[in-house]
Image: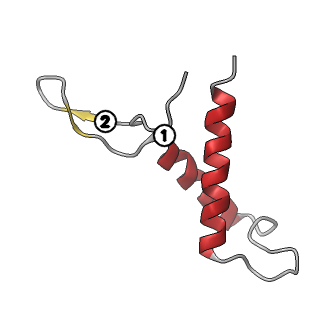
Amino acid sequence: MTNGNESINAILDSEGNGSFKGLTKREYFAAMAMQGAIANTGVAKQANGEPQTYSSLSVIAVKAADALIIELNKQ
């Protein structure tokens, strides 16, 4: 089971404690989805042909990240 709030790359101190948590899986997945959405002109345009706003693309990216986490948790 994957937890979207788990760190993807924690940096541990010499005692094995997570001193720097880094990005969560959810943040990382959303960032990758946002990158893809901005690069893909089909996703980056609204139905009327106008460009999406960064705000609307960020909503799409977070929804995509959440959907990926749900799918990863299916047996």
Q: Which residue is mark 2?
A: 10
* Above or below, comparing residue 23 to residue 52 in the picture: above
Q: Which mark is residue 4?
A: none
Within 10 angstroms of label 2, few (less than 14), some, or many (20 or more) residues?
some
Residue assigned mark 1: 25
At x 38%, y 37%, the residue is 7
Residue 63 in percent (x, y) is at 66, 51
Q: Secondary structure at mark 2?
A: loop
If you read the primary sequence from the N terminus, does the residue marked by circle 2 or circle 1 appear first?
2
The amino acid pointed to by label 1 is Lys
**Left-right relation of 10 to 25:** left
Up-down: is 57 above or below 17?
below
Q: State left or right for residue 65 relative to residue 11.
A: right
Q: Residue at x 67, y 49 (%)?
A: 64
Instruction: Give whichever of 55, 33 is nearer the camera.
Output: 55
Count residues near mark 1 (Cα–Cα under 10 Å), then give few for <14, some for 14-19, many for 20+. Answer: many
